[in-house]
Image (tube, rainbow, N blue to C red):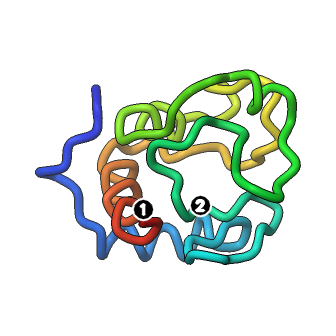
């Protein structure tokens, strides 16, 4: 099932990001890379290409362009979507959580 914008709440997504993602990622322009890359400019970017971040070969070679639907699939189970990724996060199993986080990222990373 793809991303569903009509069911997405970026306010809830911001809270989920803060509690489940922000320890490893920043979203603001010029934000630092942490354990994970800065996510500013994420949409439309090819996997493994954030400036200044060292990725695994798996991320670099995946060749996916990040968009709503690719993120929806990825965020369910990152290690299954990109075997060999160093992202330790187990994923958002609930579709609603993924919709909300993506809606937040669409606003916060442009």
**Above or below: residue 78 compared with residue 5:** above
Which image quadrant: the N terminus? top left
Query: What residue did someone put label 2 on?
Result: 39
Q: Can you say which quadrant of the picture contains the C terminus? A: bottom left
Q: Earlier along the polypeptide chain: callout 1 or callout 2?
A: 2
Callout 1: 10 Å neighbours few (<14), some, many (20+)? many
Q: Are marks 1 and 2 in contact (CB under 8 Å)?
A: yes
Q: 61 or 13, which is in the foreground?
A: 61
In this picture, is 24 found above or below 94? below
Which percent across, then down, holds residue 25? Answer: 67, 66
Residue furthest to the left: 6
> Looking at the picture, how far across and down is residue 29, in whole percent?
57, 75
| Label 1 sits on residue | 105
Numbered disc 2: secondary structure: loop
Task: Tell me, for residue 17, which label it has, or none.
Answer: none
Residue at 82% from the left image edge and 59% from the top image edge:
52
On screen, 3 above or below 81?
A: below
């Amino acid at each position: 099932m793809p991303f569903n914008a009509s069911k997405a709440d970026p306010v809830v997504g911001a809270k989920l990001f803060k509690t489940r993602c922000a320890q490893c990622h920043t979203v603001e322009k010029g934000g630092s890379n942490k354990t994970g890359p800065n996510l500013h400019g994420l949409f439309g970017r090819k996997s493994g290409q954030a400036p200044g971040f060292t990725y695994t070969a798996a991320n670099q070679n995946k060749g996916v362009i990040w968009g709503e639907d690719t993120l929806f699939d990825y965020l369910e189970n990152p290690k299954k979507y990109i075997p060999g990724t160093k992202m330790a996060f187990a994923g958002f199993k609930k579709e609603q959580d993924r919709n909300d986080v993506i809606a937040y990222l669409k606003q916060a990373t442009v």
